Image (cartoon, rainbow, N blue to C red):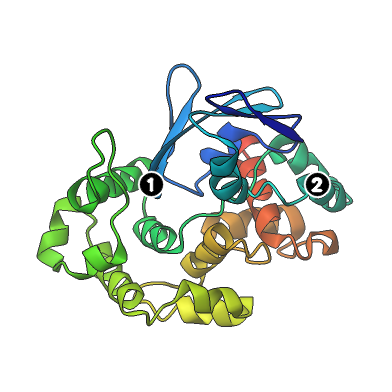
Amino acid sequence: MNGFFDGKNYVLSGIKNLNLAETLDCGQAFRWSMDEGGVWSAVLGDKLCRVAQDGENIIFFDCDETIFKNLYSPYFDLERDYEKIVKTVSENKILADACKIAGGIRILRQDPWETVCSFIISQNNNIPRIKGIIERLCENFGEDKGSFYTFPTAQKIASLSLEDLSVIRSGFRAKYILDAAKKFASGEISPEKISLLSTADARAELMKIYGVGEKVADCVLLFAFARVDAFPKDVWIKRAMEKLFCGELPKCAKGYEGIVQQYIFHYARMTKLDI
């Protein structure tokens, strides 16, 4: 894997096990969209990010080496050896087949507050509606940057009422969003503290938020804290696990459970597994 700055964009060449479409459209994050030219865009922090893929080359638009190192490299988990992970978990025949289909998925390293809020919104919901609620949340309470809106801070949301939040049309989730915001804003839930805890203790800490159960907590641990041993389970993934592995992951997946979960989910979806 090599990269260079061409005076305007940063180009990463020879990258393996990174497929932008699979990674950005698999349900990890909800603000990415692709235009007709194949360019993906989303707001990360206070920056409008644009990324495209040409084979094993990834183009990060309006990006220099510093932005790449500080933003994109951690976000796309580029320091992790996914080629080694794929080789390890492919010791199992079913996972080997899954890797052939889904081996381009990487775990995104997202902002903890945004991830908690997004996965609270995701509960009992579909992706188009999730994206719509998040878009309304940003447009109404995020910072207007001219061509885009930032994700609102926990402090901003904590200052609102349930009536204020009615504009995003999130239904029963509004009270969960508000509780999460207040706990983040007050420091009762601290990303810095969570990063120092064991996965089990970190999960328990996140579950102090009203409406956050094991599945949402594990999504946050996986997609915000890169705890790849976290394995989010919903009804769909439980059925896939029963169908493929009689409910138990093979030993070769140990330590990579969260990554394997994404492979299984995408594999089951693409092969239209009867579950």
Q: Could you tell whether 139 is left or right of 34 in the image? A: left
Of 86 and 249, the residue lying toward us: 86
Q: Say which quarter of the image contains residue 195.
A: bottom right
Q: Could you tell whether 115 is left or right of 240 in the image? A: left
Q: Residue at x 89, y 51 (%)?
A: 91
Where does the image place residue 197, in percent across and percent down from the top left? Answer: 59, 80
User: Which type of secondary structure does the marked residue at label 1 adopt?
Assistant: loop
Where does the image place residue 108, in percent across and percent down from the top left? Answer: 57, 50
Count of all numbered marks drawn on residues in the image? 2
Residue 52 higher or lower than 197, as above or below: above
Q: Amino acid at mark 2?
A: Val
CB contact under 8 Å: marks 1 and 2? no
Of 73 and 101, the residue lying toward us: 73
User: Which type of secondary structure does the marked residue at label 2 adopt?
Assistant: helix
Look at the image and tell me whether residue 229 can be seen. Answer: yes
Measured in 3D between alpha carbons, the distance from the residue under mark 1 to the one under mark 2, in whole angstroms, is 29 Å
Where does the image place residue 126, in percent across and percent down from the top left? Answer: 38, 46
Look at the image and tell me whether residue 274 can be seen. Answer: no
Q: Residue at x 30, y 61 (%)?
A: 153
Q: Residue at x 69, y 39 (%)?
A: 102
Q: Which mark is residue 86?
A: 2
Q: Residue furthest front?
A: 7
Alpha-carbon neighbours of circle 1 within 10 Å: few (<14), some, or many (≥20)? few
Where does the image place residue 245, in percent across and percent down from the top left? Answer: 76, 58
Residue at image mark 1: 126
Q: Residue furthest top?
A: 37
Which mark's residue is nearer the viewer, 1 or 2? 2
Q: Amino acid at mark 1?
A: Asn
Q: Residue at x 56, y 54 (%)?
A: 109
